[in-house]
Structure formats: structure tokens, C-alpha cells
Amino acid sequence: MYNKKSLDENDVINVFGMTTKEHYGIQTVEKVAKSLEKGGHSVKIIEGGMNIIENMKDFMPRVVSGERPGMVFNMAYGIQGQNRYTHVPAMLEMLGIPYTGSGPETHAVVQDKVMTKIVLQKNNLPTPGFWVFTSSDDTFDDLIFPVIVKPKMESTSMGMEVVDNWDDLHKAVAKQIEIFSQEILVEQFIPGREFAVGLLGNGNNIEILPIVEMDLNGDPNRIQTITDKKETPVDKICPAQLTEEQTEEIKRISLTAFKKLGLNDFTRVDFRMSKDGHFYVLELNSMASLGVTGSYYTAAKTAGYTYDSLINKMLDVAALRYFGESHKHDESADNIESQPLRSVVRSHVRSHALSNEALLEQFVNVNSSVTNLEDVNKLGSMVTARLSNLGFTVREHHEFDVGNMLYFTNHDSEENDVLLLCHTDTWYANQDFTPFYKIGNKLYGSGIAESKGGLITMLSALKALRFARKLKKIKCGILIITDDSLGGRYSKQLVHDTAKISKNIIELKWGLENGGISTSCSGVSRYHIDLTHIRRPDETIKDVVPDMCKKIIAWKKVSEDHNDARITVSEFRAITSFGRSPEHGQLSLESRYSTQTQGQRFDLELHRIAKKKDKTKLDIHISKLATRDPVEKSENITKLYELIEKIAKNADIKVQPVHRYATSGLCNVLQDLPMVGSMGPIGSDYRTPNEHILKDSLIDRSVLLALVLNKLSSMEK
């Protein structure tokens, strides 16, 4: 969890008070995330704004449901207002979510330099004398120059200035009050050397890292301003050249300060040493920087840590504090060959998240409506180019009424270990097309859930497997059809024939909420119904619409008592006149059912209601336009799902078996084979203007697909 530099409407309701000047760059945040993934953890990056609860609730385990707790690796400096370090920890405390680092009460004291100095003084720990200015007009009889001026609630050397007379002091205080809107700490300046001491651990198991000295080039009056740290950071000497007695003294002071101030897990203590060899604590940083050029990492590196092992050690000490146990990681995490595959895959997928999102935007903005043959084939060409780069060859099946079907393989065998089934066409007519856009964690656009998110999931998983040197070992087939919106009217035989030479089949439509993977899906029959009101020439004109509605209600009642089926009307229009022509109506009706037997019963019942003689005097003609058989749960499907569920659990990815009402190419497999659907990203509202997927699910589903492909391949060896 971190805070980005710029504010938007997803961070706060109002901009109010002092905004934080401290931020981690996204590169550092990603570096920490990759380190945790190399340690075997599943990671989600979340901005620490007002939506953290929504962004965490579907990712974090729920202890109240018996799941093992997750943790937040806290890198959030806060957004605005007072005591900004405390805001995210306080919210996490409220939610009952463990996190790394100190609690809100400690952050509140340590971020306030004046409170820190009071605690230090009360515990007989050396710190320079100080005075607190509430206005530039304040005066103190005991003030001794030179002094250093700094805002009392900021860190990273913000606003620091050394002055040696009252005029300059009043000017410096006035300027800082205007900039920082807070009281100003004026502290006795200590000419001499400057040091930083990093601590890592808790209780009786606190590691004091090698001491770092800032190389001031022999100038005892030099300080590091925020500009110096960002633009021209001083060199660091580690370990610092100190006597054994000096080393023990600075360690003793650091450890005592850490404990007396109630810090957790890690901190950095900053010192000045006077010319006569006395140490003075300047401040403690409860959110010590994890930048690779910072003094904390410099000390850890000298102690023998890699960046990856340091980050995972920080998580370990927090886990020990909460649970009495750590989540041990592989110390050889820097070597791809020695890492768990899930860590390698997740790290690769995450590192390409932005480029995958950009590619998804390109896919969505191609209006591949089933009627737009040119754009359907254009999208197919875009996918072909990327699969060719991954070592796949393509066989085109030309269709003139719809786009060309594409079958890819990366092997010469007669049988696929796995067949991935997806499509490029979408249901949307041109007037209904919605281009790509995003709001928070949701990505929107026509076909993004039905087809295009699944294409990105597939490409991302395959690229990660190639990076992990696993792709060539997997006999993978990919079938991309172009008539899914038409119920597979043209691809039915091709799907059937390709499935026959595949040991497992995975379909890549959108995943359902809470990780749903479909182990069964409805069949569908689509009907066009004409209704005409027959009347004699001498009969008075009658409003036909109520009679039509009575029939519609009767048809809908056919599925009323079935939780796993539904009959819906997708279009209804009536044409009436005051002339001699009969009143007429048309409607499109869909029957969705879980078993073939159920579908046959529905079909008979629909026709029976149509033929039933009643007072409506309607002449009804039913035409069945398209049919897709249901996918019924079987032993083979159950076994494949259970394998996926086990893989997902080991990778900390939530899944659950669901029945999906939407049909797919799986309906045309027509055989009892191991197959599942809905392995694309988590999505919703398909075939509406609000069709969307969850951005973070692209990572989880790509990782899951990659691990499943690898497992299914290795099982066959």
C-alpha cells in the first residue's frame, strides 16, 4: 500500500490541509512487490486512499471465515492533514488487517519531532536543545546560535536551514510557517559528523544494521537538504569508521530509543556527533526509505542482505510479531531456476501489467462486432502476430459470412495437452459500441469481459511461461472462433473436431465474481415468434398488446420454478392499425437450461402454450433460430476443476465452481472431456454499456492460467 504523488477523486473527498511531500515512486513500489512475489507471496498494489476497503476486500483473506490472514506491506506516507503516517495504519487497525511497521500511536509521536525529543529527554537519551516557534515573532532568552530550523511534522530534511542570527531566524521561521502551515522546530545545530543507524526486528530479537556515515567531505557545518537528497545525494560510508566504544554507544542509544518510543519492525535513527565525540539523536524515521540509494538499504546491503531478502525479512519480523511465525522465503530468490514457478510467473506478469493494459485498450477499441468482418479479421491478425512471436503457427479456416477462424499450435504432435478456446467477435452493433475507458480498478469497453480480457490473459500467461522456460514443454492448442455471438453457428464442427484431439479444454470468457470458474453452463435455444390477431371483418377492433403480453407471461412462467434455468424476452414489438389488416406482434425469446432434458421440456411447453386455444385468438408461429447444448458437470470436469482449485490455493488466488448462464464454445465440444470455462479476468455486465473487468484480476488470472497449463503438461509426461 502506497500513496502516489498526484491527488484525484479516488483518493479523497476534499483537498483540505497540508498535503504530504513524501512519496514512493511507482518503480520502488513495483520493486518491493516483485521482491515479495519472489518470496512466494501473492501481492496486490493498492493506493492508500479512501477506497482501500473496496480494493482489499476481495483480495485479502478473511480470518473470520477460517482463512489464514494476509498482511499489508505498508509504504503509505499518507495524503493530507495532520499525522499523515497514522492514517493508513489506523484504518488497517479498524479493519483488523495486520501490517508492517509501527502503529498509529507511535507514528504520531515519532513524526512530531518535538514529542520525539521530549520522550528522548525523559529517558536520558542525548538530543540537541530545542525551541518551538508558533510565529516568527517569538523570542527565547536562552537560544544559542547557530541553530537549524525545520518544520516539526515533516521528514526527509524538508525545509531545513541553518542560521546564526535573529534576523535570519525570523525570516526562516516565517517562510516555513507559510510553506508548511505548522509549528517550527528550532534546534541547536551540532557541527560535526552525521550518521544513520538502521534497526530491524522486535523485542529481544532486534538486529542493528551496520552504521552508515554521510560523507560530508570534512565539512562539519554541512547538512543534507531535501534538494541534496533528491538531486546530489552525498556518498555513504558503511560501515562507518568509529572506535569500538563509539560503535557500542551509538548502538545502545539507537536500541533504547527504538524501544522507548514503541516502534515496530524497523526504523532509522539519525545522529550528529560533535567534535568532542558526543552523539546526539536528531530524529527517528518510522517509515525509513526503502529506496536503493537510501541509507537504510545501504546498511542492509553491507549486512549481507539483497533487496529481495531485506523486504522479505521485514515481512517476516512483522509476521513473527503478529502470529509468532514467519512466512519464510527462498533465500536464493534472485535465481530464476531456484524460485517457485508461481513467483517467477507472477513477477513477470506484474512487470508487464502496464503494457498488457495498453494492449487490451487496443483490442477493445477494435470494434469487432460479428457483423464487422474487416475488424474481426483485424483483431485476429493482431493476436496472430503476438502468438507467432511466442512460437505458435496458425491455420486459418476461412469463413465469408463471419471472420476467419484461427487455430494455433506450438508443437508437431497430433494431440494437445491443452486447448485454449476464445473468440474475437462481439455482440455489439456499431451504435452500441463503447471504447475502452477505466475508472479506479475497473476497465470498461465492449467485449472486454466476453472475449478481449481473455485474450490478454492468454497472451500474458504464455509470455510468462516463455520467460520461465516452460512454454516449449507444453503442447498447447489455441482455437479462436468468430461467431460466438451467433451461438457458434459456423464454428460448431471445428470446435468439436479440435476438442477431439485435446486432453483438456479451457475457455477464456470472463470469470465470475469471487473467482467463479464455470464447471457447467446453460444451453440456449433462441426463438423468433410471430403473433397475429385474427378477427372477422365485422368484428370490432381490439387492442392486441394485452393478449400478446398474456402469452409472454405464460412462456416466462415455464422457467419460474427452476433456479438453474430462465426464459427471457430480448425483443418485443407490436404493430397495430385501425384498418382491415390484422394486428401483429414479433418477439425474440431465449430459453436457457442446464440439461438437454430440461431444454427439450421447455421447447415442448413453449409450443404447447403457443397452440393452446384461448380467448386471445392469436395465430402464433415459432421459429427456432439457434441452439447450443448445455455443458453438464461431469466427473472429468470435476477432476480438472479440483486440480485448478489446488493450484489456485497454493498461489493464494480465490476460485470457486459456478454454473454460468451464458453459453460458450464449450457447448459445441459435444464430448465428455475435462473442460472448464470462465478462466478469463473477473468481469461483469456483459453485453451492456457497463461491461467491465477488474484490472487486478488480469494478473491473478494470467498467473493461474500459466500454472494450470504447466501442470497439465507435466501430468502427461
Image (cartoon, rainbow, N blue to C red):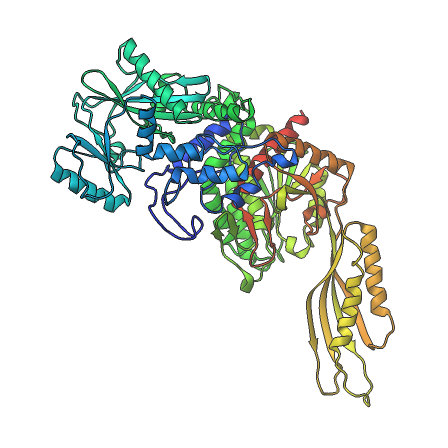
Q: Is residue 175 visible?
A: yes
Given residues 76 and 563, the one toward you in this image is: 76
As drawn, which residue projects farthest toward the top? 244
The residue lying at 75 percent from left, 78 percent from top is 544
Residue 410 against residue 627 in the figure, above or below: above
Q: Is residue 421 visible?
A: no
Quarter of the figure with residue 410? top right
Q: Position of residue 62 (x, y in %)?
A: 60, 37
Q: Position of residue 390 (x, y in %)?
A: 52, 35
Given residues 160 and 585, the one toward you in this image is: 160
Quadrant where the C terminus is found in the figure:
top right
As drawn, which residue projects farthest toward the bottom? 538
As drawn, which residue projects farthest toward the front? 141
Given residues 556 and 100, the one toward you in this image is: 100
Given residues 73 and 307, the one toward you in this image is: 73
As drawn, which residue projects farthest toward the right? 613
The residue lying at 45 percent from left, 32 percent from top is 103
Q: Position of residue 225 (x, y in %)?
A: 23, 33
Q: Is residue 224 left or right of residue 23?
A: left
Q: Position of residue 195 (x, y in %)?
A: 27, 22
Q: In this view, does 609 lie to the left or right of 674?
A: right
Quarter of the figure with residue 188? top left
Q: In this view, does 538 lie to the left or right of 169?
A: right
Residue 476 against residue 425 in the figure, above or below: above
Q: How many labels does the image show?
A: 0
